[in-house]
Amino acid sequence: MELRYLYVGADDTEVELEAWLAAAGTALPRWRFQAFGADVAAADMGSGPAVLVADHRPSGSVLPIYAVEDLDVSRATLEAAGWRSEGPAAGTPEGPTIVLRSPSGIEVALLRLDRPTAMEAAFADPGNDRRVTR
């Protein structure tokens, strides 16, 4: 497993994104989209996981998202160790993901990276009317 994202909930994506970009020492997000009633942006922190800022997650929450090679095997391994699935797998532009909860209630997500550059490619597409540029 590799920690790919920290999925951060925010009341105001713009305000929270600016704070993360300032911490990273940059002025531009990796990508940002507004679609399906949500505003989601990725801040590249220079090393380690990117920070995803999203207004559809509970403000102040942080969900670690780990990239895995085999979603079913990783899920089964965690479930055998006492974790429980928080619903069925869901689709994302990069691949399917599942949220699991530890015995003490900590949530993590697992992501099978089928399309690791999907978000960057969509953001680079000038015809994508969902991308937010500055």
Image: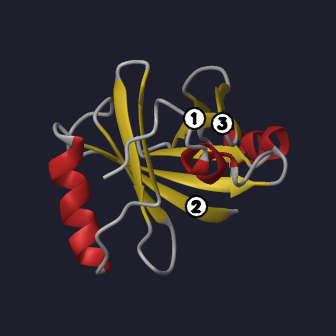
Within 10 angstroms of label 3, few (less than 14), some, or many (20 or more) residues? few
Label 3 sits on residue? 93
Within 10 angstroms of label 2, few (less than 14), some, or many (20 or more) residues? some
Amino acid found under the numbered disc labelled 1: Gly
In the rendered image, residue 118, in percent from the top left (x then y), is placed at: 68, 46
Judged by depth in the image, the label closer to the viewer, 3 or 2, is 3
Label 1 sits on residue? 127
Distance between mark 3 and mark 2 Cα atoms: 14 Å
The local secondary structure at tag 2 comes to strand
Q: Is residue 120 left or right of residue 7?
A: right
Within 10 angstroms of label 1, few (less than 14), some, or many (20 or more) residues? few
Amino acid found under the numbered disc labelled 3: Pro
Judged by depth in the image, the label closer to the viewer, 1 or 3, is 1
Judged by depth in the image, the label closer to the viewer, 2 or 1, is 1
In the rendered image, residue 9, in percent from the top left (x then y), is placed at: 29, 42
Distance between mark 2 and mark 1 Cα atoms: 27 Å
- Residue drawn at x 45%, y 39% as measured from the top left: 131
- 115 or 109: nearer the eye? 115
Label 2 sits on residue? 4
Q: Earlier in the sequence, mark 3 or mark 2?
A: 2
The local secondary structure at tag 3 comes to loop
- Residue drawn at x 35%, y 65% as measured from the top left: 28
